[in-house]
Amino acid sequence: MLYKSHQSVIGTILVADDQAANRELLEELLTAQGCKVITVPDGAAAVEELTRTQVDLVLLDVMMPHLNGFEVCEKIKKHPDTYLIPVIMITALSDKQDRLEGIKVGADDFLSRPVDRTELLARVRSLLKLKQRTDELERAESVLYALALSIEGKDPYTGGHCERLAEYSAALGGHIGLAEDQITALRRAGVVHDIGKVAVPDSILLKPAKLTAEEWKLMQEHPVVGERICAPLKSFRLVLPIIRHHHEKLDGSGYPDGLRGENIPVTARVLQIVDVYDALTTVRPYKPAFSVPDALQTMKEEVAKGWWDPQIFDQFEQLVRSGAADCLSRGAAAAGANR
């Protein structure tokens, strides 16, 4: 028997096959195990169904009209709303090339026809458990994101800051050639980088005047607190160094660890630059929003002081001035207009 989740239905499975007999057989086997089964006759119908229905697993025939199984799988794995859905490809073909093609487009498992009942249920059981764990992880991440956004929401001057940093840092990370997992970490860190401010009293967080030495010391603890909050999530392994070190400076004058130069993780150096840019180009209680040229000039002066990575800043400046990352200029304009 497949595992039981918190819902009465243990999983929703989409079956795409152009042969009615195959669809009926799979539906009968899986429904008997407590699954909700949706069947469609071709690849295009499968893609359309995924826009309407939350699915836990997809079973794809390889040879289908309109879109074949490889094409459907590729669409599933490339779309941000569906890429975590496990896909099993079913084929009568034994050619090694077909399996290689399936792996290339992101298939999670394979079954050969005629489908063996025991093997089918074992593969489905395994992937549904995996999907359940993935959903739990997504829920945990959602809680962290909600907490981070609630902290941002306390300050009327920082609305949209987290969303902009996620977009800016991913754009810059891609521009300088960071690996995909680092870019994903930057997107996540853009949202949660200041989550440790949950431990900072509002009287300090929202204070319009200069902080006292004692208040500033407490404020400087927020990267460590943020790292501690996010540490239990294994998927945040690459996010943690960004959270902890996004307030370091190249000359060692930053916090919390006073790291210098390349001892500061490259992803943290990326987030630093876009964080400063966003702060400069938005209205704050102590200053108006800078124009993009003025913000870049100010940052250039700070690079000369030894605060920010000069090579990453050069790439960032090129990105902004070239308009290659429209989100940077759009975000700055929108942030200024909404104040």
Image (spheres, rainbow, N blue to C red):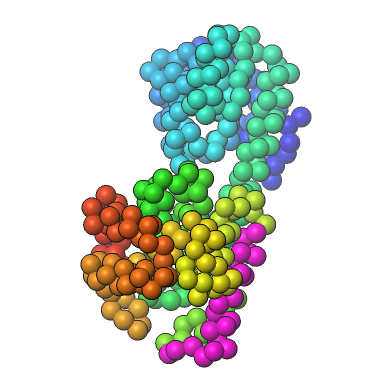
Identified at 40% across, 20% down, the residue is: 67
Q: Is 211 covered by the magenta stretch?
A: yes
Q: Is residue 70 visible?
A: yes
Tally of marks = 0
- Vertically, is 176 above or below 72? below
Q: Residue 220: percent from the left, percent from the top?
A: 55, 77
- Vertically, is 216 above or below 106? below
Quadrant including the N terminus? top right
Residue 281: quarter of image = bottom left
Residue 117: quarter of image = top right
Q: Which residues are magenta?
A: 209-231
In this orientation, which residue lies closer to the viewer: 250 or 140?
250
- Vertically, is 248 above or below 175? below
Q: Residue 145: percent from the left, percent from the top?
A: 53, 60
Q: Residue 109: percent from the left, percent from the top?
A: 61, 24
Residue at the right extreme, as displayed: 1
Q: Residue 307: percent from the left, percent from the top?
A: 42, 70
Answer with left or right where residue 322 lies relative to residue 162: left
Identified at 40% across, 24% down, the residue is: 44
In this orientation, which residue lies closer to the viewer: 5 or 70?
70
Q: Main secondary structure of the magenta part?
A: helix
Identified at 29% across, 54% down, the residue is: 319
In this orientation, which residue lies closer to the viewer: 225 or 316?
316
Q: Is 320 covered by the magenta stretch?
A: no
Quadrant including the C terminus? bottom left
Q: Is residue 192 visible?
A: no
